[in-house]
Image (tube, helix red, strand yellow):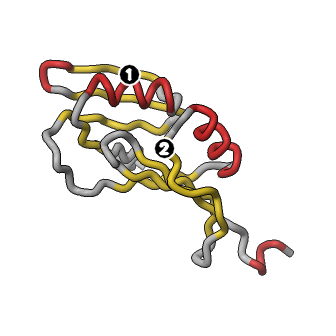
Amino acid sequence: MANAWRELVPELPVADLERALNHYQGTLGFTLQWVYEAHGFASVIRDGVRLFLRRQNPPFDEVVCNFYVDDVDAVYAELVASGAHVLCAPADKPWGTREFSFDDPDQNLFRVHRLLKKADEAA
C-alpha cells in the first residue's frame, strides 16, 4: 500500500536527558539512535520499538506506553534483574491480557502485555 503507516513513536518528556539516556540504555536495554543535545531531544530503539525522549520542565502530563511482547514473564525477569522500577508482577487480567507495569525516573508509565488466548481459540 503506497500510503501505509509504518510506525508509531511515542515522545516522552524527561527532566534530564543524560539521566534518561543512561536509564533507557543501561537499565532497559535500548540502543541510542541519535541525540540532538541543542534541543534536548534523542531517539532510542529496542527490538524495533522506538522512543523519542524530549527534555522538558516538570510537572509532566501523564504518559502511558503499552508494549506487546511474546513472553511477559521473561521481560519482567529481565527488567527486575536490571534494576528497573517495576510497579507490579505479571498477572492475568480480566480483559484478556497478561501484563505488568514499570515506570522510568520521570514517572512515564509502561505496561507490558501479552494477549491471552480466548477459550474458543485454545481448543
Residue at 17 percent of width and 49 percent of height = 59
**Label 2 element class:** strand
Q: Position of residue 111 (x, y in %)?
A: 49, 55
Circle 2 residue: 85
User: Which residue is at the front of the view, 85 or 28?
Assistant: 85
Q: Indicate left or right for 54 with 28 as reference.
A: left
The span from disc 1 to disc 2 (Cα, nearest Å) is 24 Å
- In this image, 76 relative to 112: left or right? right
> What is the quadrant of residue 91 in the picture?
bottom right
Q: Residue at x 50, y 54 (%)?
A: 87
Q: Secondary structure at mark 1?
A: strand
- Residue 65 at what x, y percent from top left? 40, 53
Q: Is residue 121 above or below residue 32?
A: below
Which percent across, then down, holds residue 113? Answer: 58, 57
Residue at 54% in and 53% down: 112
Instruction: Inspect the image, locate mark 2, and give the three-letter code of the amino acid beneath it.
Output: His
Q: Nearer the viewer, mark 1 or mark 2?
A: 2
Q: As shown in the figure, which amino acid type bears the numbered disc 1?
A: Gln
The one nearer the camera, 31 or 110, is 110
Residue 18: which numbered mark, if any? none
Which mark is drawn over residue 33? 1
User: Do the residues bearing badges 1 and 2 touch, measured as CB atoms within 8 Å?
Assistant: no
Q: Nearer the viewer, residue 106 or 1?
A: 106
